[in-house]
Amino acid sequence: MPDSGFIIKTRYLTNLQEAIMGKLIWTADLDTGIDVIDKQHRRIVDYINQLHDARTSGHKQEDIGKVIDELVDYTMSHFAFEESMQEEANYPFLKAHKKVHELFTKRVGSYQERFRLGEDVSEELNNLLVTWLFNHIKRDDADYVESVKQNLEQHDFITKKKGFFSRLFG
Ligand SMILES: [Fe+2]
Ligand SMILES: [Fe+2]
């Protein structure tokens, strides 16, 4: 007879626990509700899963390095995109958010460098990415959603209004 406690525990594993044991699973609590941002976050998660695969299926260090570089590049461009959206929306905590991105970039950069120099830090980096990213999405990113959404809706409204007037008087 299986231990029912175990079944319950495995059923209620958080995405973080899943990630440390295996692949990351996207759960609804990670959605911000801003489509373009959610797509980017999901893509970062895909990259993290690729890194997990590369590490656990005996890929060459060179290939693992390539996945790390792509993941870091994509994450950096996501940060830049996110910051520009916040800027446009006049998000009051842009400066603090930028700082958090900056510190994380430095941290990841030093892992990247150690990996390049031959240190086997890919598992450590993998775990850092998972814990940091999920916490950041749920806490820091969730905080700007309201401002950015409002700004996007306003933009959409003005564009539609312009379209309406040009149809009327054009
Ligand atoms: Fe962010
Ligand atoms: Fe983000």
Image: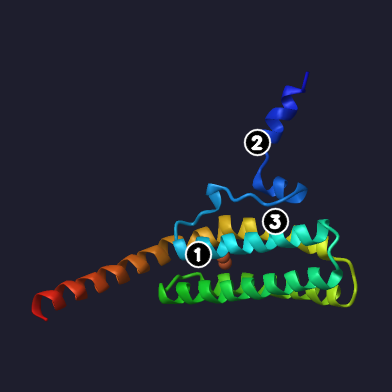
**Cα–Cα span, label 3 and label 2:** 18 Å
Foreground label between 3 and 2: 2
Instruction: Establish if 133 lies above or below 167.
Output: above
Does the closest atom of ligand 2 sit within 8 Å of the Cβ of label 1? yes
Q: Which mark is residue 12?
A: 2
Using residue 26 as the reference point, say whether residue 57 is left or right of it. right
Q: Residue at x 68, y 29 (%)?
A: 8
Q: CA distance from mark 1 to mark 3?
A: 19 Å
Assess disc 2: are there few (<14), some (14-19) or many (≥20) residues with their C-alpha within 10 Å of its C-alpha.
few
Mark 1 lies on a secondary structure that is helix
For the residue carrying disc 3, how many other residues have a C-alpha within 10 Å: few (<14), some (14-19), or many (20+)? some
Q: How many numbered marks, from 0 up? A: 3
When the figure is inspected, residue 10 is found, relative to residue 91, above or below; the finding is: above
At 45% from the left edge and 61% from the top edge, which residue is drawn? 35
User: Amino acid under label 2?
Assistant: Tyr
Ligand 1 is found in the corner quadrant, namely bottom right
The residue under label 3 is: 131
Q: Quadrant of residue 141?
A: bottom right
Judging from the image, the colouring scheme is: rainbow
Q: Which mark is residue 37?
A: 1
Quadrant in which the C terminus appears = bottom left
